[in-house]
Image (spheres, rainbow, N blue to C red):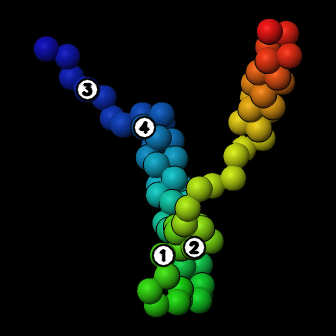
Amino acid sequence: MATRGRPTQQKRQRERARQEQRKIKDARRQEAKERRESMPAPPAGVDPDLEGIVAGPQPLSEWQEEGLATFEDSDKDSATDG
């Protein structure tokens, strides 16, 4: 049965790296917490995800307009041919 030696330098480096990552992560968390607290509160009754959305049919996107124009052009060509 083999005996284990003392903790190696690599283990110490891993532990230091782990502690450094913890410090960085804690600092990011604290910064995000402060940023959230400093932001003004949203108005009551307004969902920020739905703000600015208009009910009803939405305008066509650019690629849909291009496809519709192509379809209408081919439809006109077939109507004039026959």
User: Residues at badges 4 and 1 in contact (C-beta under 8 Å)?
Assistant: no
Disc 1 residue type? Asp
Please name the residue shown 85% across and 10% down the image.
81
- First along the sequence among labels 4 and 2: 4
Q: Is residue 40 above or below residue 53?
A: below
In the rendered structure, the answer to whether residue 28 lies left or right of residue 44 reads right
- First along the sequence among labels 1 and 3: 3
Which residue corresponds to mark 1? 47
Which residue corresponds to mark 2? 51
User: Residues at badges 4 and 3 in contact (C-beta under 8 Å)?
Assistant: no
Please, what secondary structure does the residue beneath circle 1 have?
loop
Q: Quadrant of the N terminus?
A: top left
**Nearer the observer, disc 4 or disc 3?**
4
For residue 12, what is the image quadrant? Answer: top left
Q: Is residue 12 above or below residue 72?
A: below
Disc 4 residue type? Lys
User: Residues at badges 1 and 2 in contact (C-beta under 8 Å)?
Assistant: yes
Compute the Cα span from label 2 to label 3. Answer: 63 Å
Which residue corresponds to mark 4? 11
Residue 22 x %, y %: 47, 58
User: Residues at badges 4 and 2 in contact (C-beta under 8 Å)?
Assistant: no
Disc 3 residue type? Arg
Residue 33 visible in the snapshot: no
Disc 2 residue type? Glu
Please name the residue shown 79% across and 18% down the image.
79
Q: Quadrant of the C terminus?
A: top right
Q: Is residue 20 above or below residue 27?
A: above
